[in-house]
Amino acid sequence: MLPILRALRDDGPVSRAELGDRLGLTRPRLTSEVERLVKAGFLAEAGMAASRGGRRSTLVEIHPRLRFAAVDLGAGSIDVEVVNGRLEPLVAYREPADIRKGPKAILHRVSELLAKARAEGVYDRLDAVGIGVPGPVSFRDGVPVSPPIMPGWDRYPVRELLAREHGCPVVVDNDVNIMAVGERHGGVARSVDDFLFVKIGTGIGCGIHLTGGVYRGVDGCAGDIGHIQVDASGPTCSCGNTGCLEAVFSGAALARDALAAARSGTSPALAERLARAHRADTHELTAKDVADGAAEGDVVCIQLIREGGRRLGGVLAALVSFANPSMIVIGGGLAQLGHVLLAEIRSVVYRRSLPLATGNLPVVLSELEGRAGVTGAAVLASDAAFEQIP
Amino acid sequence: MLPILRALRDDGPVSRAELGDRLGLTRPRLTSEVERLVKAGFLAEAGMAASRGGRRSTLVEIHPRLRFAAVDLGAGSIDVEVVNGRLEPLVAYREPADIRKGPKAILHRVSELLAKARAEGVYDRLDAVGIGVPGPVSFRDGVPVSPPIMPGWDRYPVRELLAREHGCPVVVDNDVNIMAVGERHGGVARSVDDFLFVKIGTGIGCGIHLTGGVYRGVDGCAGDIGHIQVDASGPTCSCGNTGCLEAVFSGAALARDALAAARSGTSPALAERLARAHRADTHELTAKDVADGAAEGDVVCIQLIREGGRRLGGVLAALVSFANPSMIVIGGGLAQLGHVLLAEIRSVVYRRSLPLATGNLPVVLSELEGRAGVTGAAVLASDAAFEQIP
C-alpha cells in the first residue's frame, strides 16, 4: 500500500483516523492494510494521538528499524548515505573518486563505505539501495548503457551485483534523474509535478519530472540535452559532433575557455589564478575560478558566464516551448556561478519562449545542491522497497 | 467502465467471455458492468458467440445508436464528420473556410453542417462532440487561448456554446493534438505509446503522445515548436521574434521563398507557375507548386525543401535527445513534399541525436493525412462521453 508508506515517510507519524481521512480509506480497509504493513515490518504503532473529540486514535509511523542506502556516483566523487524510513541521514560519506577507475573499483569502495556504516552500528541489514550514475541507464535492466564518461561500465550488472550483496531491492538510475527526484522530495520543487531539473556539471543533463514521476523515454535516455547543437561552427565535442551545448558550456568547456583567457592575458583575475595553479603544480583552472573572478568583477569571467547562460537559455527556451513545464531548477556544480548565470538564462527563456508558457514559470537554483542526488536515490530506494511488499 | 467501451469501440463486437478474459474481470463484475452500460444506452447485446467448448457466451457490442460529431477547424478549412460508436464516418463534409472570420461565423457554419446531417437522418441526437482548432487551447476550460492566427477566438467559450447547443459533452483541443490522437487510433502510430506528431501546415506544431494520452503541459501549450529559434539572423516571425522555425520553414514561409525564387528567375519551374498564377489572377504560389517543381527536377524547388527539412530536422534532433520517443510522424499539408523532405529530416535526426535514442526510431509520414484530425476529434469525443457515464 504505497500511499500509506509514502505519507508516513514524507510527513511523519500520524493518527490512524487522520491517515484514513487523508487517503480516503474506510476504517476496515485501513485496519487491514495497517495490519499487513506492521506484519511486513514497515509500519509501527507509536502511542496514542491527541483526542479529536471522539475516541482517541493510535499513532502509526514508518518502522524505525528501516534502513536505505543512497549512493550518488559523480564523474569525480562518491556520495554514500544510510538513511532511516523518514529518509533522514544517519551517516554520510563523501569522497573524491574517478569514475573512470571502472565499476569493480568504484563499487568495491561503495561496499567498504557501507561496511563501515554497518560496523558502526548504523544498520543491521538494508531494506533497499538506490544508486545514481553519471551516464545513460536502462532503468528496466538496472545497467548503464554506453555511458560516454564511464569506460568499463557499459551494461555492467550494477543492480544484480548490489542486490546479491545486500539481499534487497536495488534501483539504478541516471544521476540527473535522481537529482530531480531529490529536489521534488525535499527541495525547491516540493509539491511541483511537472518540472525540469537541469544539471550543469562536467557535462549537462536534464531530469524530466512529470505527474507520475521521472519520465525516462523509450530507451531510458530522455533528458540527454548535452549534445543538442547550439553552434554549427562551434568546438568539436567528445561525442564527435560539433557545437554541442556541452562542448560550448559545461564545467569542462568553462575550464578550457578560462585557461585560454588566462594565457591570452585578457583576464587579470584568471591569469593570477593560473599563476597560483602553476605554483601549486595543478596547472588547471576550474569553473570555481571563473565564479570567483566574476565575483571580483573580472569582465572576462562575467562574459564567459553570460555567454554560457545565453547558450543554455536558448536550449531551455526551446524545451519550454515544447514541454510547457511549471518550473525549471538549475543544479550541479556550475550552479555556483549563481545569479549572473541565472539572470542570463531567465532573460533568454522569457524572451524566446511562448508567452503562454512563461507566464508563471520560475527558473530557480536547486535548494539541495550537493545533496539532491543522494536524497533522490533514497526516495527511489524506499519506493522500491515499498513496492515489493507482498 | 472506460476499458470495456474502448475495447468495443476499437475492436468491435466480442463475446462476454472473451471480454472478461481480455480485461481481467471476474464474471460477476463483468455482468454488473455490462448491465450498467446497457442501461446507460452505450452497450447492446448482439446475438450469440461461437462456442469455445463450454456454454455459449453472448456477444456484446458498442450501442449501434451512438453518434459522435468530429470537427477539425484548419486555418482555411472546416472538416465535419458524424461517426457511429465504432467511429466509422456516416457522413463527412469538407469545405474551405477562413478561420479569421471569427468564432460566430465559423461555428455557425459547423452548426449548419451538423443540422444538414441530422435532416438527412444520420443522427437524432449527439452523444458527444470533439473539435480541434488551429491554436493553443486551455483543455481544462475548453477555450482557445491567445491563438495567433485566430483573431476574435481568444477565450471564446467554444465548449460551453457547443455543449448547450447539442446537450452533450464537448472536448476542445489543439489541431495537432487531435491529429496525434487520430494517428494513434487508426494510423501509422497504432500501438505506439510515446511518439511525436509533427504537423507542417501554414504553421508548425507538435502533438506529444505519451503512455497516458496527449501530454498538454501545465498551461496546455506543450508542443508549440513553431517558435523555437533556428536562425538568429533569420526572417522576422509573426510572433515578433526573429528566425523562428515557422518563419524559416512552413507553408507560409515556403510560399514566400517560392515567390522570391520565381521573381528572381533562378527557378524556371516556379517562374512558369507564377506566370500561370498571374493569368488566373491569384498571383500567389503555394507549397504545392514547390512540391510539383521538385517532382519535375527543378533544382531550386528541391533545395527549398531540403533546406526546410534541415531546419526542421535540427529542431527534431534536439527534441529526440530530450524526449527519447519511439516514433516521429510527419503530417499536415507540407507532408506532401514527401520523400525529399523526409530524407533530409531523417538525415539530420540520425546524425545529430544521441545514438541510443535513434537506434529504433522510425521517422515516417502520416497514414491518415487529411483525416487524422477528425479521427482524433472523434476519439476524444467518445472518450468524453464514456467518462460521463454515471
Image: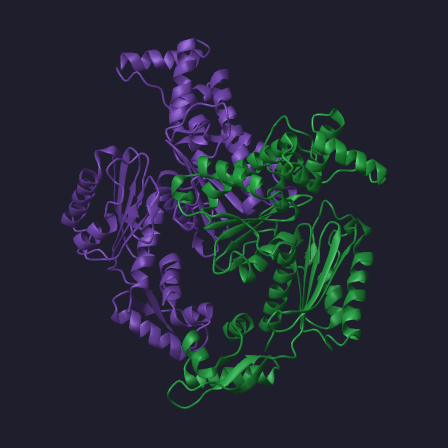
Chain colours: A purple, B green
Q: Residue at x 40, y 62 (%)?
A: A7
Q: Residue at x 56, y 57 (%)?
A: B183
Image quadrant assignment for residue B132? bottom right
Tag count: 0
Is B66 rendered above or below residue A236?
below
Query: Looking at the picture, how far across and down is residue B302, in whole percent?
Result: 61, 34
* Residue closest to the far bottom: B55
- Residue B369 in the figure: left or right of residue A290: right
Query: Looking at the picture, how far across and down is residue B363, in whole percent?
Result: 50, 46
Check the picture and name the quadrant holding the C terminus of chain B: bottom right
Q: Nearer the viewer, residue A301 or B4?
A: B4
Q: Residue at x 71, y 48 (%)?
A: B147
Residue A298 visible at all: no
- Residue B383 in the figure: left or right of residue B27: right
Q: Residue at x 59, y 85 (%)?
A: B39
Is A14 rendered above or below residue A335?
below
Image quadrant assignment for residue B156? bottom right
Query: Looking at the picture, how far across and down is residue A284, in whole percent?
Result: 32, 18
* Residue closest to the far top: A265
